[in-house]
Image (cartoon, rainbow, N blue to C red):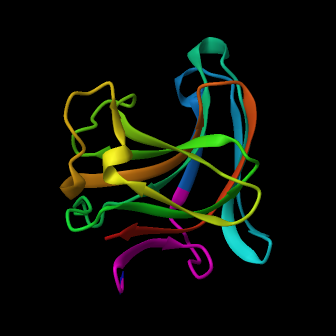
Amino acid sequence: MELHDELLLSDLSRDSDPGWRSFSDRVMGGISREQASLTTIEGRRCLRLQGEVRLENNGGFVQVALGLESRGASLDAGGYSGVQLLVWGNGEEYLAHLRTRDTRLPWQLYRAPFVAQPAWQTVKLPFDAFRPERLAQPLNRGALTRLGVVAYGRRFLADVAVARVTLYR
């Protein structure tokens, strides 16, 4: 859905089935715990990720992820400059992860950091800010398959919410 210079990917104020899923490092033997819930914070309906990030057993993440593929085809974001998130949080640093057709292994991704303040804010993450993790290819904007909001890499209590996601020009 085009909105002026934006492409809407998720709007929790009106999505009855938002298409997000949550998971943690438990998928690979870690012991972090996550809980994701549709809720309302300061009058905005959102998806809230809460959890305890633990580093034992080579762990260290909790995440909510939105699939970007439609009918088996990846999302072509070539005409856009980046990802825009409407987020709320506990003042901690989080990561936005992008996966593409090039990220075939679970540990391959592109990531960009942001701080989620304890008030609703719009965070703009230009595609150039996404750094490859364990792969050599630059980010292919024409082949996006998943977006994640991730608490990662250090022991802490995660509390972050997402109300809206768009691509911006």
- The one nearer the camera, 92 or 160, is 92
The answer to which quarter of the image holds residue 155 is top right
Q: Is residue 62 left or right of residue 1?
A: right
Find residue 129 and report its horizontal and vertical position in percent: 37, 45
Q: Is residue 142 left or right of residue 119?
A: left
Q: Is residue 74 left or right of residue 150?
A: left
Quadrant housing the N terminus: bottom left
Find residue 19 and report its horizontal and vertical position in percent: 50, 64
The residue range painted magenta reads 3-20
As drawn, which residue projects farthest toward the top? 57
The answer to which quarter of the image holds residue 13 is bottom right
- The one nearer the camera, 157 or 28, is 157
Find residue 66 and report its horizontal and vertical position in percent: 47, 57
Q: Is residue 17 magenta?
A: yes
Q: Is residue 113 magenta?
A: no
As drawn, which residue projects farthest toward the right? 42
Question: What residue is drawn where x is 56% and y is 77%?
Answer: 15
Seen in the picture, residue 44 relative to 68 is either above or below; the reply is below
Question: What residue is drawn where x is 72% and y is 75%?
Answer: 44
Quadrant housing the C terminus: bottom left
Find residue 93 and report its horizontal and vertical position in percent: 63, 40
Question: What residue is drawn where x is 48% and y is 49%?
Answer: 148
- The one nearer the camera, 144 or 94, is 94
- The one nearer the camera, 61 or 126, is 126
